[in-house]
Image: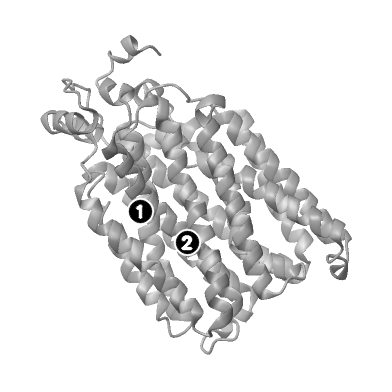
């Protein structure tokens, strides 16, 4: 699409603008919300093995109790993302942009002082509502301010912050948890600091010009356009009503099915591996301290994958990079499952087997973040119009959390009853499903304006 053709769009100034300081500020302040999700999920993953011997948390010693506490935040996200995503389309992007950070700060403080299993479960459940809301809000704000040529990079950078949060959490856990019986409390408390900082700074972020225009507030939209892009272009659009049912209309139902199934499949495998990293490494014979160190190293590899996504997503396209990710996940999970099934536990210390396990974990982490771990926050933004963009993002997030909950609750039981190998095969099946649905329903959205994609 040429610049001249773009000028026929009411938002061409955003589509062709060179990124300015305010756009990077919006991206950073949005990305920290995703960072905090990665930090929190990984913090509970590092904490679960420790809670087994903490007074008041004995229920963690059961497979069901272990899985439910692991999935507690995810259950909250299931409800928060879809409901507040819809509110975001009705009331504006900025309406909940600050308050979800307030929820995170308060609930994280309560988690740090949890006195038993039930209190932590409830606090994490409510925390999940705030995190789910941020998924719908922050990615939508970035997409609606971004120029076409860098939209993929900026959205991928937003997604990459999850892995940075995970790497930070596991690294801190390695240095804090083994040396103090209350170290896990300090780990959660650290997450309060960035949440409070972002809560204050987000007040300066402007409302989305696309949302303002869709609400008939053209003058305010033009003022935001001038502030962000430096251009003043008259904005006139045909307004569309926000409707949840529109996600399942004939025009968008294919996009909704694709986003739902590919994200669901990804989250079954990703959340299981990501949150239970220390548990899996412990089952392979590593000590608790080395399992935390290994989890930190693998999280860094995930950051490498997200950097590769930022570098290549606008070159090779969304569909191809998603497929590359799912293929890498499928291969690595299958090999890990075979190793776990066929090789006795005491043989995992052998150099050749250890090298294979490390290589497969690295392949999994790099490819999953390079592919679906980044495009799950990109596709919903590009396949839905302004009137239902946050609703679509929220729906995808919520539906994917059903997959995450499935992975987090079924895997501990499979591992407890049948062994680690069958648990990994369970994840492999869903990674394979991700390949199939991407091939059949995935579309290419690279190089097109948001209006062109949803016209």
Q: Which residue is mark 2?
A: 39
Quarter location, residue 408:
bottom right
Q: Is residue 65 above or below residue 438?
A: below
For the residues bearing labels 2 and 1, Cβ distance under 8 angstroms: no
Residue furthest toward the left? 219
Marks 2/1: CA–CA distance: 16 Å
Q: Please determine whether, in this image, residue 243 is positioned above or below residue 167.
A: above
Q: Residue at x 48, y 32 (%)?
A: 255
User: In the figure, residue 422 lies in which quadrant?
Assistant: bottom right
Residue 39 relative to residue 235: left or right: right
Q: Position of residue 86 (x, y in %)?
A: 31, 46
Q: Of circles 2 and 1, which is in front?
A: 2
Up the image or down, 405 lies above or below 307; here it is below
Circle 1 Cα neighbour tier, 10 Å, few/some/many (<14 / 14–19 / ≥20): many
Identified at 77% across, 67% down, the residue is 284
Tally of numbered tags: 2
Characterize the local packing of mark 2: few (<14), some (14-19) or many (20 or more) Cα atoms within 10 angstroms: many
Q: Report x, y in % for residue 386.
A: 31, 33
Residue drawn at 51 percent across, 68 percent down: 172
Residue beneath disc 1: 133
Determine whether, in the image, residue 71 is placed left or right of residue 204. Answer: right
Does dot 1 land on a helix, a strand or a loop? helix
Of the two numbered discs 2 and 1 on the same chain, state the one appearing first in sequence: 2
Residue 421, image x, y percentages: 78, 60
Give coordinates of residue 319: x percent, y percent: 57, 30
Residue 83, which numbered label? none
Residue at the extreme top of the image, as rendered: 4
């Amino acid at each position: 699409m040429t610049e001249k053709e773009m000028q026929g769009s009411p938002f061409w100034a955003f589509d062709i603008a060179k990124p300015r300081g305010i756009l990077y500020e919006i991206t950073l302040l949005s990305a920290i919300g995703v960072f905090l999700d990665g930090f929190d999920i990984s913090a509970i993953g590092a904490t679960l093995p420790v809670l087994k011997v903490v007074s008041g948390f004995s229920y963690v010693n059961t497979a069901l109790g272990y899985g439910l506490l692991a999935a507690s935040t995810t259950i909250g996200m299931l409800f928060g993302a879809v409901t507040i995503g819809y509110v975001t389309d009705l009331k504006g992007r900025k309406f909940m942009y600050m308050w979800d950070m307030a929820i995170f700060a308060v609930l994280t403080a309560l988690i740090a002082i949890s006195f038993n299993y039930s209190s932590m479960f409830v606090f994490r459940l409510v925390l999940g509502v705030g995190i789910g809301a941020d998924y719908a809000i922050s990615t939508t704000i970035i997409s609606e301010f971004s120029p076409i040529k860098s939209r993929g990079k900026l959205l991928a950078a937003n997604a990459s912050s999850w892995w940075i949060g995970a790497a930070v959490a596991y690294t801190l856990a390695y240095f804090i948890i083994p040396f103090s019986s209350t170290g896990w409390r300090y780990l959660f408390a650290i997450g309060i600091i960035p949440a409070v900082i972002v809560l204050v700074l987000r007040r300066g972020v402007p409302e989305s010009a696309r949302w303002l225009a869709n609400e008939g507030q053209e003058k305010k939209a033009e003022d935001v356009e001038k502030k962000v892009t430096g251009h003043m272009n008259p904005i006139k659009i045909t307004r569309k009503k926000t409707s949840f049912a529109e996600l399942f209309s004939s025009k968008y139902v294919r996009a909704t099915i694709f986003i739902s199934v590919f994200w669901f499949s990804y989250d079954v495998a990703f959340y299981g591996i990501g949150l239970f990293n220390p548990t899996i490494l412990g089952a392979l014979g590593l000590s608790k301290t080395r399992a935390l160190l290994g989890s930190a190293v693998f999280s860094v590899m995930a950051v490498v994958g997200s950097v590769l996504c930022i570098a290549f997503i606008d070159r090779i396209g969304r569909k191809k990079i998603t497929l590359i990710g799912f293929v890498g996940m499928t291969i690595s999970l299958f090999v890990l499952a075979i190793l776990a099934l066929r090789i006795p536990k005491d043989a995992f210390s052998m150099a050749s087997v250890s090298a294979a396990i490390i290589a497969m974990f690295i392949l999994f982490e790099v490819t999953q973040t390079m592919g679906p771990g980044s495009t799950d926050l990109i596709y919903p933004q590009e396949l839905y119009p302004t009137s239902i963009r946050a609703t679509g993002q929220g729906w995808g997030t919520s539906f994917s959390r059903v997959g995450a909950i499935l992975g987090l609750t079924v895997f501990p039981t499979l591992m407890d009853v049948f062994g680690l190998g069958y648990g990994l095969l369970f994840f492999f099946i869903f990674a394979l499903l991700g390949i199939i649905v991407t091939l059949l329903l995935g579309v290419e959205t690279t190089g097109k304006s948001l209006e062109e994609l949803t016209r």
